[in-house]
Amino acid sequence: MTHDLVILGAGPAGASAAITAAELGLRAVVLDEQQNAGGQVWRAPSGVETPGDDGARLRDRLRVSGVTRAFGRRVWLAERGFTVSALGPDGAEDYRAPALIVAAGAHERHVPVPGWTLPGMIGLAAATILLKSQHILPGRRVVVAGVGPLLLLVAAEILRGGGEVAAVIDANRRRDWFATPLALLSRPDLAGRGAGWVTRLLRAGVPILSRHALRRIEGTDGVTRVFAGPIDADGTQIAGPERAFDCDALCMGYGLQSSTEVTRLLGARHAYQARGWAPVTTAEQLTSVRGLYACGDGAGVQGVAAAPLRGQIAAIAAARDMGRLSASEAENRLVVLQARLGRAARFGEAMARLATPPPNLVPSIPAETIVCRCERLSRADLDAAITQGAVTVNDLKSATRCGMGPCGGRMCEYAAAGLIGARTGRTPEQIGQSTARPPLRPVALQALAGSFDYDSLPMIEPAPL
């Protein structure tokens, strides 16, 4: 299928890019693995949708835009030119266009602790899916731990759903939340929503442990108790009483990092920013690869307020670069959007800073703790390989298979890179990212191969001896 523009991801950035592209007369297709638009933050509920909220409005606009919506597609390959290969309800599909916008969003950052592989431990972002989309509690008595605004959101939503929050364990200090007052004032509506979450927790008598981190998780067939202790500003464990909390679930997360698999696979240049790796883009969201644009949190985490604006900017730039919009008209539109983006990004970046774990949390991981869940590799396993010369993420991957499981490194690469840095003193730029390779997501070989008759396959004559 050939289009003017392919857009990967139908969250706030990707869907906004698609709507804008259609308004500019481009034949656009937007692909997403989910069954509807909205992404993580505006995920469509499983039941009746609340009319008029941000997600519902976005889905309504996309529905009437004329954009081809290819939902339920798992993208496993992207090639320059551009060709995007996906698995859909009817099997393998290819989408072609001279321009590609990647709005892949972000995934959770994890810091392993002993016991984090037990059933009942889920990420904060996964918990929001259960709570917002499925209206399911992660447990009846839950501990919420990590850093960032999702801590408060998840804890407040558990209370609203009728569950009990045993404790909120926050690696930040309380005053860290008020360190950027100008950023908070730039979005008083969102700041007020966060204040409402805190109020709900305090009224319910939920213990909020600031400047604390998890020490270990206990249980046999699932989480039954967690232990937390104090840390200093860098995340190093310090002397002080441990607190134990009985629970049947733990929601844990340490912020978000950009999903860069597609842009890495296509050879775009990436740089390590303050909060993780992201593709290098111009102010118009263009990467170092001609015709390839990246927007939303997949191009650096700036939050939901900034994402739609970045999507619109990418679509306008693509239309201009394809000669479908004059340079002067594009400039007029971009100036307005970029001014709005500056204001929106200020708040999002402040929240992203709050959701960045202290640097010494990873070096504090005990030796026996599983770091790579897919390959069952402990910190001791990785440390041994680092000592023997594995000084980049790719070195470690080759030496131990860390990051080669079904998650493709999304669960373990942050911690693995941190362990290399702690042991060698190398910078994130020197440690690097893992090489992206297809398939970008696990796919069944049978689905790619389709149906065929072995007897009909052409057989190559054997080479003469």
Image: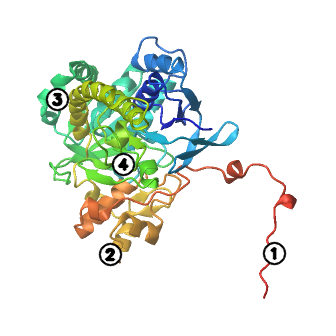
Q: State the separation of the CA atoms marked 1 and 4.
A: 52 Å
Q: Nearer the viewer, residue 51 or 295?
A: 295
Looking at the picture, which amino acid does disc 4 mark? His
Q: Position of residue 130 (x, y in %)?
A: 48, 30
Q: State the separation of the CA atoms marked 2 and 4.
A: 23 Å
Q: Are marks 3 and 4 in contact (CB under 8 Å)?
A: no
Compare marks 3 and 2 and give the one earlier in the sequence.
Answer: 3
Compare marks 1 and 4 and give the one earlier in the sequence.
Answer: 4
Compare marks 3 and 1 and give the one earlier in the sequence.
Answer: 3
Q: Nearer the viewer, residue 342 or 50?
A: 342
Task: Residue at 27% x, 36% y: name it.
Answer: 148
Residue under label 1, please give it: 461
Number of the label disc, if any, that sits on residue 183: 3
Task: Residue at 39% x, 26% y: name it.
Answer: 158
Q: Position of residue 257 (x, y in %)?
A: 34, 45
Question: Which of the two marks, 1 or 4, is nearer to us in this view?
Answer: 1
Number of the label disc, if any, that sits on residue 387: 2
Side of 235 where 457 appears, left or right: right
Q: Residues within 10 Å of mark 4 (few under 14, many from 20)?
A: many
Q: State the separation of the CA atoms marked 3 and 1.
A: 69 Å
